[in-house]
């Protein structure tokens, strides 16, 4: 039996400041292929190239990756400021539609960093443009200097709801994670359940209440050395199992075991 296909949401880049490309980090493909045991396919996030329906008909699951551009604040009813950073309206158009469709279809989806924020915005939630400027919050941004190992190092604790889906998945109510984000959840969207928070109160793990399939998202980057990390590995394994269940049932919802 062939492995399920996971569509990895790509980001727009200019190679050498002139050649346009859609790309995703190699560590995303490695986590999907080696830990989730699925086939990674990078998706061009531009609505001119493929509709949400065509993407979902092609893939068994969707991985919403991180990315430097942020969700445009117009998507949650606010004006853009300098603090909101750069944007990618084409990715907004594709990714937000994918979230809403997966939430209804039960098609498996895992959100990471920007993908975590997209899940919230797609369901009607809002974002803070800069977490580190809020009273009592830590700096969650990626360290500006150092090696990749240093930038993706475990930096803070996430406390999970006892008995919640992330607790059941990880087998612990506290886990250590990396942190490489500037923005974060302000108001949770409809059906968004915040299931894990950093010590400063920042939302770090969410799921969609009542979703008929695997719909989980984390603010950190579990794709970094996913096969070695005791938190990342079960998350990607559960995502892969959900994609296999979806493919095995001919694209029919399989109730998300993690959410019970």
Image (cartoon, rainbow, N blue to C red):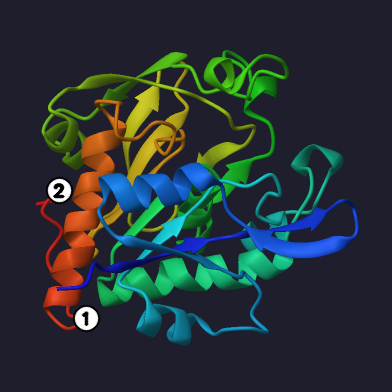
Q: Is residue 188 visible?
A: no
Which SS class for mark 2? loop
Residue 19: x %, y % from top left = 84, 62
Q: Is residue 100 above or below residue 181?
A: below
| Residue at the disc numbered 1 | 251
Q: Is residue 20 visible?
A: yes
| Residue at the disc numbered 2 | 258
C-beta proximity under 8 Å, tags 2 and 1 = no
Q: Is residue 34 above or below residue 209?
A: above
Quote the CA–CA distance across marks 2 and 1: 19 Å
Residue 113: x %, y % from top left = 51, 42
Q: Is residue 25 above or below residue 48?
A: above
Asked whether 69 or 125 is in front, the reply is 69
The residue drawn where x is 53% and y is 19% is 149
Q: Viewer-nearest of labels 2 and 1? A: 1
Instruction: Please identify the quadrant where the N terminus is shown.
Output: bottom left
The residue drawn where x is 47% and y is 27% is 202
Residue 249: x %, y % from top left = 12, 79
Tell me if 247 is positioned left or right of 197 in this view.
left
The residue drawn where x is 24% and y is 58% is 214
Tell me if 146 is positioned left or right of 240 in this view.
right
**Which quadrant of the view contains residue 218?**
top left
Residue 165: x %, y % from top left = 18, 41
Which SS class for mark 1? loop
Nearer-N-terminus badge (2/1)? 1
The residue drawn where x is 12% and y is 36% is 168
Q: Circle 1: is it few (<14), some (14-19), or many (20+) Cα within 10 Å?
A: some
Asked whether 25 or 11 is in front, the reply is 25
Q: Residue furthest front?
A: 1
**Which quadrant of the view contains residue 13?**
bottom right
Q: Circle 2: is it few (<14), some (14-19), or many (20+) Cα within 10 Å?
A: some
Tell me if 254 is positioned left or right of 181 in this view.
left
């Amino acid at each position: 039996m062939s492995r399920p296909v996971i569509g990895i949401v790509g980001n727009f880049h200019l190679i050498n400041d002139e050649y346009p490309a859609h790309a995703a980090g190699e560590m995303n493909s490695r986590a999907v292929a080696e830990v989730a045991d699925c086939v990674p396919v990078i998706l061009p996030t531009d609505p001119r190239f493929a509709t949400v329906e065509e993407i979902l008909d092609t893939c068994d699951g969707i991985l919403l990756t991180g990315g430097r551009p942020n969700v445009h604040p117009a998507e949650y009813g606010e004006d853009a400021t300098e603090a909101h950073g750069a944007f990618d309206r084409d990715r907004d158009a594709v990714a937000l539609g994918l979230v809403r469709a997966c939430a209804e279809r039960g098609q498996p989806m895992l959100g990471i960093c920007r993908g975590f924020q997209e899940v919230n915005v797609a369901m009607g939630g809002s974002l803070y443009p800069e977490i580190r400027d809020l009273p009592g919050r830590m700096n969650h941004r990626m360290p500006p200097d150092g090696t990749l190992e240093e930038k993706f190092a475990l930096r803070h604790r996430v406390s999970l709801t006892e008995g919640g889906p992330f607790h059941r998945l990880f087998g612990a109510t506290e886990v250590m994670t990396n942190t490489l984000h500037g923005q974060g959840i302000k108001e949770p969207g409809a059906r968004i359940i915040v299931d894990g928070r950093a010590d400063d109160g920042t939302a770090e793990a969410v799921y969609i209440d009542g979703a008929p399939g695997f719909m989980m998202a984390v603010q950190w980057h579990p794709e970094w050395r996913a096969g070695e990390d005791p938190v990342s590995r079960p998350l990607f394994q559960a995502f892969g199992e959900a994609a296999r269940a979806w493919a095995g049932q001919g694209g029919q919802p399989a109730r998300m075991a993690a959410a019970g």
